[in-house]
Image (cartoon, rainbow, N blue to C red):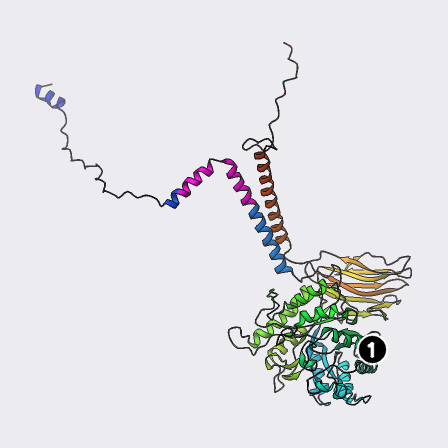
Amino acid sequence: MSQERRRQWSAPASRPARTARPDRRPAPALPLARTEPPPAVVALAQRAARFNRDPDRVRALFAATIAICGLLLAMLATWADVTIHRGVGDGTTPPIVRQYTGRDLAANVDLTRFSPEQLPTVSAGLQANGIRYVRQSFSWAEIEPAPGEYHWERYDAIVDALTRRGITPVAVLHRAPAWIRSPGMANAFDAPPADISAFERFVGAVASRYGDRVPFFQMWDLANLPSRWGDAAADPTTYVALLARGSNAARGANPNAIILLSELDPFPRNGEMNDLDFLRGVYAAGGSAFFDIVAVRLDGGTRTPYDRATNPSQPGMSRAILVRGLLRDEGDAAKPIWATHFGWNADQSGAGRIDESTQADYVVTGLERARAEWPWMGPLFQWGLIPGPDLGGSTPSGMALLRDDGSPTPLFTELGAFAARGGTSAAPTGLAPVAAHQYVWEGNWDLQHLGSDTYRTTSDVDARLRLLFEGTGIVARARLSREAGNVEVKIDGEPVAISLESFQATDVDIPLARRLPEGLHEVTLRLTAPGQLTIGGLIVERTIPMQWPILLLLGSGVLLLFVGLFDGILLAAERSGLLERRRTGDLWPELPLVPDWRPARRA
């Protein structure tokens, strides 16, 4: 290879010129003012540092936090239970409320405002829209305008028109005539009689004349208002004297008579006694023995039917729960409550105004709530049929079922639709007495009245009864005896085995079915062999909803409270020297080591 070529191979390759590297040195820092944290933050940080260095303090804080959380959960569960379940019953928890009717549609209707020729048409319209109970004024002043001089014609026509249509009257006995009032009470709208024995004779005359066609008697109306008590201050003790004489007279003339306490105004003016205070006064005066049913006025106000607030100074459907609680406090929880006025006013103005459509929805929803949740509630009477003077003062146009021209309001139309689609065809929660229209009786059945209880009995083989009910269980109130025959029981077509034979006659409650799916069910009882079958009614059970979440919440709260308190007590015992301090993270004390006791293996 030539010298020139060798030089070419050995010469290093030419390299590209290097580019200048960027200067990566950091830019000079800008001078910043030195900032100090706020003194409060510094103090808090120092305190937290000292706190963290003491494990007992951390443990005490942890135990207190757990205990407080548990207490709050328990309080929340209690509040939720009271709010959601206050007044709600399953129908079978003692004491079982004695009902005298089915929970059907009812209304306040003053038929004295109609001519005798109109009565058949009005009563037919009520029946067509599902009304089965009518609260009707029986004015003492009209029936007995002079001592011993009775004018029955108008009221005979009213009772005849209603009973022909299967509607049961509830007679409100009030309006004392002028000849029996004290001179100073002559100008009052109503007044108690100066001689109570005259009222006693009047009540006995009404009960004797109408018998079982008018089984319900309400003694006076709005007895806590001065305008209904001779413009004098209402007095529960004086009212109880009137109630006792009237009640004894009605029961003496008709042993099957059922007595309602006077309806009471919940919001009287001028500081008069409200319904709750007056009712307490009635019990304090010993009036419990003289009435079977408590009456309450339920004005929904501007609240929804599912508003569970029970403020005694404001209207609302849940006011009935306050009356129920009062009965329980007085040991009289077996008595039912009737809402002798019930509804919402569609004529209200302002922010809480309720239109006619909403009013109809509220009333039907309220009926459904009472039937499902309140086994202690009887019929709920619509406020009034037509606007104008009526029981309880007057019926506002916004609460009437008919307009001034006689046309139905949306409320009346919706009530009729509710009845037509079977809203009252099934027995609701609680006792369904044998008088309830939901029963279907086949064969020969006789009525038996034992005190305030009514039974149906049969000796007719193949006689049966059927009941459609809405709930999750059914209990039969039946009579056991030596004469009892064999009974076939079916729930939704499935047989259930029971026996009514007993060496001693006694009335008992026999569970027929429990834990059924929520909804409609049918029960049938049939006498299959010679003997007797005696029934005092069927009790519909309904499992109270929303119990498990509350129980779970309560159980969690109690558990956390126990753990927090237990750990706090352990810590206190360890610090005081009563217990040996445990190692961190050890739940149990360390066991001593046991030497190996096994013999050595042979070689």
Is residue 253 in view from this perspective?
A: yes
Image position of 528 (left or right of 297): right
Front residue of 44 and 423:
44
Q: Which quadrant of the structure image shows residue 261? A: bottom right
Q: Position of residue 22 (x, y in %)?
A: 19, 37
| Amino acid at circle 1 | Ala
- Badge 1: few (under 14), some or many (20 or more) residues near its Cα, within 10 Å? many
Q: Is residue 257 above or below residue 467?
A: below
Q: Position of residue 70 (x, y in %)?
A: 58, 48
Residues in magenta, as a range = 43-66
Label count reads 1
Secondary structure of residue under mark 1 = helix
Q: Position of residue 594 (x, y in %)?
A: 63, 21
Is residue 423 in view from this perspective?
A: no
Q: Position of residue 267 (x, y in %)?
A: 62, 74
Q: Going by the picture, which residue comes out furthest to the top?
A: 603
Residue at image location 57% in from the left, 51% down from the top: 72
Q: Quadrant of the C terminus?
A: top right
Q: Which quadrant of the structure image shows residue 526? A: bottom right
Question: Is 368 contained in the magenta span?
Answer: no
Front residue of 407 and 442:
407
Question: Is 44 contained in the magenta span?
Answer: yes
**What secondary structure characterizes most of the magenta part?**
helix
Q: Which quadrant of the structure image shows residue 478? A: bottom right
Q: Quadrant of the N terminus?
A: top left
Image position of 9 (left or right of 108): left
Image position of 457 (left or right of 6): right
Label 1, on which residue?
Answer: 249
